[in-house]
Image: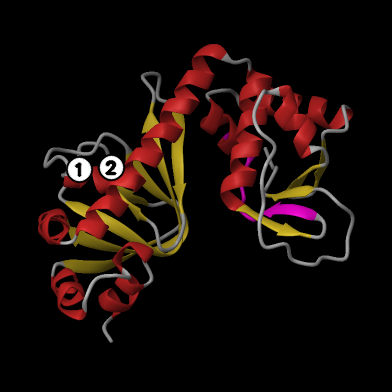
Amino acid sequence: MSGQLWYLKTCGLFESCNPEQLRRLEANSRVRTVSKGSPVYLPADAADSVLVLASGRIKICHLTGDGKQSILAFIEPGEIFGELAILSSGSRDEYAEAVEASRVVAISGEALCQLMEEHQGLCFGITKIIGARRQRIERRVKNLLYLSNRERICHLLLELAEQYGRETARGLEITIRLSHQDLASLVGSTRETVTVVLGQLQNEGLIELGRRKVTLKAADRLAHQVGVEPLKVQSPQPHPSANGVTLSHSLGS
């Protein structure tokens, strides 16, 4: 089995494609290795391909008018990104950068569009992805306009816990690694402000700061403070330690 075909099969979107359809995608795709910190694509690059992340992690970013980085999303293995190439043959608006050494499969946007025309399930799946990502971005923009720094950071911690959470006896563990600057770029704030707010949340007993991790000690209280529903988790996994929601990420400056 060739590399492209194997990686395509790791993407849940293509699970229902038949062998002939997968072979067509494979013939119109290429595998690329991207080193940590290197761009996958840049603003103004031609939006002529959709990408599948085979391994590693990618962040999708936008540069503000004053040159600051705003993080729009993180992409995990098996996910597609750059999907707006399906809707437009113009250029990229955002840029994608490898958070760690990554391998991506670039699929011809034209070939994918042809497959979507004959595969209703694939078309529906990609439409849902586009809608969900846009909804998440719109929610963050709304938060930026109407919420305080503290509220935005609380919303982000809960969103990360929901998106990357894995329940154990200790609570909900999040394995994504983020710096204070990453958190600031996600909520439109500064690293210094994020550090201050995290310190306040710890003093109030809502979270516990440790080396390379944050533990949400009172996730329900945190959710109540910002007016959202408590987190719902599934598939509990035993763990010998104390209760809490653990957000495992780098907290270096």
- The part of the image, by quadrant, that contains residue 159 is top right
Q: Position of residue 129 (x, y in %)?
A: 35, 47
Q: Position of residue 16 (x, y in %)?
A: 29, 70
**CB under 8 Å between callouts 1 and 2?**
yes
Q: Which residue is depicted at the point 28% across and 57% down?
A: 51
Q: Is residue 54 above or below residue 91?
A: below
Q: Which residue is depicted at the point 18% across and 61% down?
A: 119
Q: Disc 1 marks which residue?
A: 45
- The part of the image, by quadrant, that contains residue 111 is bottom left
Rendering colour mode: secondary structure
- Left/right placement of residue 40 relative to residue 224 reads left
What is the span of residues highlighted in magenta in the rendered image? 171-181
What's the residue type where badge 1 is placed?
A: Asp
Q: Confirm whether residue 68 shows in the render.
A: no
- Left/right placement of residue 5 relative to residue 112 reads right
Q: Confirm whether residue 253 shows in the render.
A: yes
